Amino acid sequence: MKILKDYVVVILFTASLMSLFSCKKDAVNSNKNSKVQLGTTTLSSFTDPLEVSLYAGVENHEYGNLDGPRLLAKFASPNGIISTPTGTLYITDTGNGSIRKITPEGIVSTIPFKKRFVNPHSLTMAMASDGSIYFYFLEIGKERPIRGLQPHDRNDSISWPAEVCHIVDGIKIPFVFANLFDFATLDRTMYLVDAGAHTIIKRTSDGVGTVFAGGTAGYKDDNGTNAQFNTPTNIAVDADGNLYVTDVLNFRIRKITPDGTVTTIAGSTKGFTDGIGSSAQFTSLEDVIVANSNTLLVADGYAVRAIDLTTHQVTTIAGGATPGYVNGPALSARFSGISQIAVHNNDIYVSEEGARYIRKISPL
C-alpha cells in the first residue's frame, strides 16, 4: 500500500509560470469538442494468453541512478508511470527525486532539470487543442506539489500550476486538502482524490474547487456528498467523463458519473477472488486506469486485474495473491508489489517501486 502523507496541494499549470496565490483561470486551451483518451490499449480481450517480462531495471533489485539501455538502467523507486501515444514512458523515480523517460527504442534517460524533485509521485496527462501533451505530477512534501511537464517538442520544460480555490463570502480562498493522493484530468477540469477527507474534489477551469462526491468515512452509494468513501486513493477518468476510484478500505472500485452519482463497480470484503461485481474481492488496491472503452485495469497488490465495464466481471490477468519475482506466462508470473500501471497498444507496463523494476505484460 502506498504511504499516504499529509500535504497541501495546488493544481493545474499553464504554458507560462503562474503565481502560487493567483487562483487564476487556466490558460491551457484543451480540446473540449474532441475528448482524447490517452494511453489506451488496442487489446480487445484480456482472455488471450499473456506473458510477463522485465522491461527496465536490473534483475538483482540493485538500487541506483543509471541511465542507458533499459536492461542496464537502474532506478531507486519507480512509482508513477504513464505512456504517450508514441509509446514513450515517463516514470517518477521517487527515491532519486527525478523524472525518468524510456523511449520506444529502449533508452532510459533522466529529464535534466536544475533541481532535484521532492518525492515525485503520481502522473497524469492531457492533450491541448494544438495536439501538445501535458503531464501533471505530484511532488509530495512541497508547498506547490503539482507541477506541469511539456515533453518532446517543448524541451521537457516545467511550469508551475494555478491553485485550487473555493469561494468564501465572494472571495477566492486557497483550498486546503487533508491527504491529497491522486488526480485525473479531462478537458480543462481536474478531479482530485483527498484520501484524508474521503472526498473527490472537482476543479474547473476558473480555478474553483468544490466537493464533487463523498465527505465522510463510510460506504454508501448515492449522489454527490451523500455518498461515502473510506480512504479513496487513485482515480481514472474515461472519455465520457465517468470517474473510477479505488476505495481502499472498502476494498471496492467505485464509479462516479458526470452528474455525481456514485455506484460500486466491483468488490466487497478483503480477499482475492475473481467474479462479477460484489462477488469479486480485492486485497490491496493500488491503481486504476481506463485500458479501453470497456475495460479497467487495477493494480491489486501482487496482481493486475481487469474489470469488464459491461458485465462487471473481475479477472486476474497477471500475477496472483502472493509476492515474488517470476517472468513468463502471466498467471504464473509473480510481482513484488505493483505501484502503478500504463498501457500502450498491446502492451501493459507496471512499476514495482520496491523491486526497482518496470515489468511488461504483452500477448504471447
Image (cartoon, helix red, strand yellow):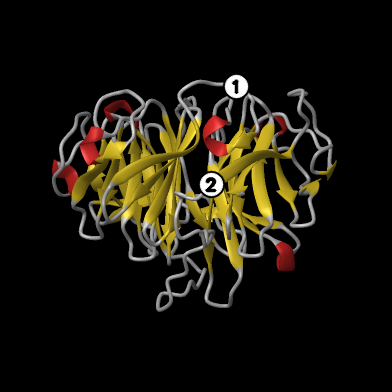
User: How many discs mark residues in the rendered view?
Assistant: 2
Residue sitting at x 53%, y 71%:
128
The amino acid sitting under disc 2 is: Pro
Q: Residues within 10 Å of mark 2 (few under 14, many from 20)?
A: few
Whether residue 28 is situated above or below residue 125 in the rendered picture:
below
Residue sitting at x 29%, y 37%:
275
| Marks 1,2: beta carbons within 8 A | no
Whether residue 280 is situated above or below residue 22 in the rendered picture:
above
Q: Position of residue 309 (x, y in %)?
A: 31, 53
Which is nearer the eye, 136 or 272?
272
Image disc number at residue 49: 2
Left or right? Give the position of 246 relative to 95. left
Residue sitting at x 35%, y 30%:
282
Image disc number at residue 39: none
The amino acid sitting under disc 1 is: Gly
Q: Position of residue 40 (x, y in %)?
A: 51, 59
Q: Which residue is mark 1?
A: 324
- Secondary structure under tag 1 reads loop
Q: Position of residue 208 (x, y in %)?
A: 34, 56
Left or right? Give the position of 239 relative to 101. left
Q: Is residue 239 visible?
A: yes
Q: Position of residue 29 (x, y in %)?
A: 50, 73
Q: Quarter of the image holding residue 139?
A: top right
Whether residue 304 is situated above or below residue 171 in the rendered picture:
above
Work out whether mark 1 precedes mark 2 in sequence or the reverse, and give the earlier one.
2
